């Protein structure tokens, strides 16, 4: 479902004399449907960079990033947007929303964008908000004023609203209480059971051990000294 081939990344610092910093070279791995792979490695090893490349936020220097048959490293922006709508979900650490949109709409939006009927999309959104213990009194409000943990749970609900075949999870259990952490681990297990291919960054080692089938240490893709 996800296949990374000979992937390299160099950052060019345009505001610092064009200095080029190689952060990754020859990265290679794949993730099968129903499998969860954890990215590990020291701080600065390139876990977030790799995840952002897979989502198409960062441009790869060379190599291929195949997600459901689309090569993100070479795809046109509109192909990447279509891939994100239908195939590739991303739960980042922070919720970014349009101000004034009610929480329940924020969660239902990925389904509405796919043409799901409104009643079904809102029903799914309410079910997820209930599971993630967001009080019903908050559903009609914009999540912009919510607490950090509440925003994270809204973000998770949104990320799991559509059954994406491929999912990227960046610290999905960070700053959650024990009960909500369990719910998130259940959602991940359910996504795996329906065949989603998942790549996650989990500093929560116990959570990682529970949901990940294997770990890939990103530092093994560090560029070789020239
Ligand atoms: N936009 C950027 N411009 C320049 N350098 C960057 C950029 N983003 C990341 N880097 C560099 O790439 C390297 C990898 O960073 P990255 O954030 O991917 O590491 P990480 O493994 O996710 O670390 P952490 O566990 O601390 O979040 C670091 O040396 C970082 O300085």
Image (cartoon, rainbow, N blue to C red):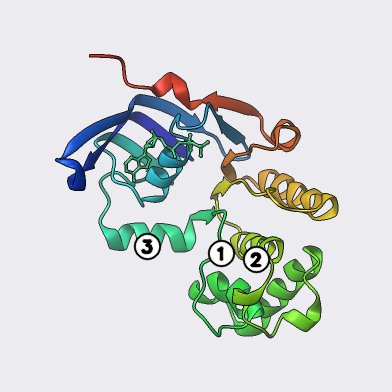
Q: Which residue is mark 2?
A: 151
Q: 121 or 209, which is in the foreground? A: 209
For marks 1 and 3 on the same chain, the one whose residue lies earlier in the sequence: 3
10 is higher (above) or lower (below) than 224: below
Q: Is mark 2 within 8 Å of ligand 1?
A: no
Q: Secondary structure at mark 2?
A: helix
53 is higher (above) or lower (below) than 136: above
Disc number for residue 128: none
Q: Secondary structure at mark 1?
A: loop
The image shows residue 186 at horizontal and vertical percentages of: 77, 49
Front label number (1 vs 3)? 1
The image shows residue 157 at horizontal and vertical percentages of: 67, 64
Residue at 74%, 80% in the rendered image: 138
10 Å crowding of disc 1: few (<14), some (14-19), many (20+): some
Q: Are marks 1 and 3 in contact (CB under 8 Å)?
A: no
Residue at 52%, 73% in the rendered image: 97
47 is higher (above) or lower (below) than 223: below
For marks 2 and 3 on the same chain, the one whose residue lies earlier in the sequence: 3
The image shows residue 181 at horizontal and vertical percentages of: 77, 50
Q: Is residue 19 left or right of residue 59?
A: left
Residue at 28%, 14% in the rendered image: 225
Q: Are marks 2 and 1 in contact (CB under 8 Å)?
A: yes
Disc number for residue 81: 3
Q: Which residue is mark 1?
A: 95
10 Å crowding of disc 3: few (<14), some (14-19), many (20+): some
Q: Secondary structure at mark 3?
A: helix
Structural distance between the alpha carbons of marks 1 and 3? 18 Å
Q: Is residue 7 left or right of residue 122?
A: left
């Amino acid at each position: 479902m996800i296949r990374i081939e000979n992937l390299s990344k160099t950052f060019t610092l345009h505001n610092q004399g064009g200095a080029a910093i190689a952060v990754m070279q020859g990265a290679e791995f794949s993730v099968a449907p129903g499998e969860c792979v954890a990215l590990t490695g020291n701080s600065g090893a390139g876990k977030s960079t790799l995840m952002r490349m897979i989502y198409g936020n960062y441009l790869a220097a060379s190599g291929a990033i195949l997600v459901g048959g689309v090569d993100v490293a070479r795809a046109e922006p509109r192909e990447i947007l279509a891939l994100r709508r239908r195939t590739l979900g991303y739960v980042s650490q922070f919720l970014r929303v349009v101000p004034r949109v009610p929480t329940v709409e924020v969660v239902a939006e990925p389904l509405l964008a796919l043409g799901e009927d409104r009643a079904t999309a809102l029903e799914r959104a309410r079910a997820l908000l209930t599971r993630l213990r967001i009080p019903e009194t908050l559903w009609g409000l914009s999540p912009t004023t919510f607490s950090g943990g509440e925003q994270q749970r809204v973000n998770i609900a949104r990320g799991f609203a559509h059954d994406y075949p491929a999912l990227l999870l960046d610290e999905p259990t960070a700053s959650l209480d024990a009960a909500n952490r369990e719910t998130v681990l259940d959602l991940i297990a359910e996504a795996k059971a329906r065949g989603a291919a998942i790549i996650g960054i989990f500093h929560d080692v116990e959570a990682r051990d529970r949901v990940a089938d294997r770990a890939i240490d990103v530092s093994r893709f560090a560029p070789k000294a020239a």
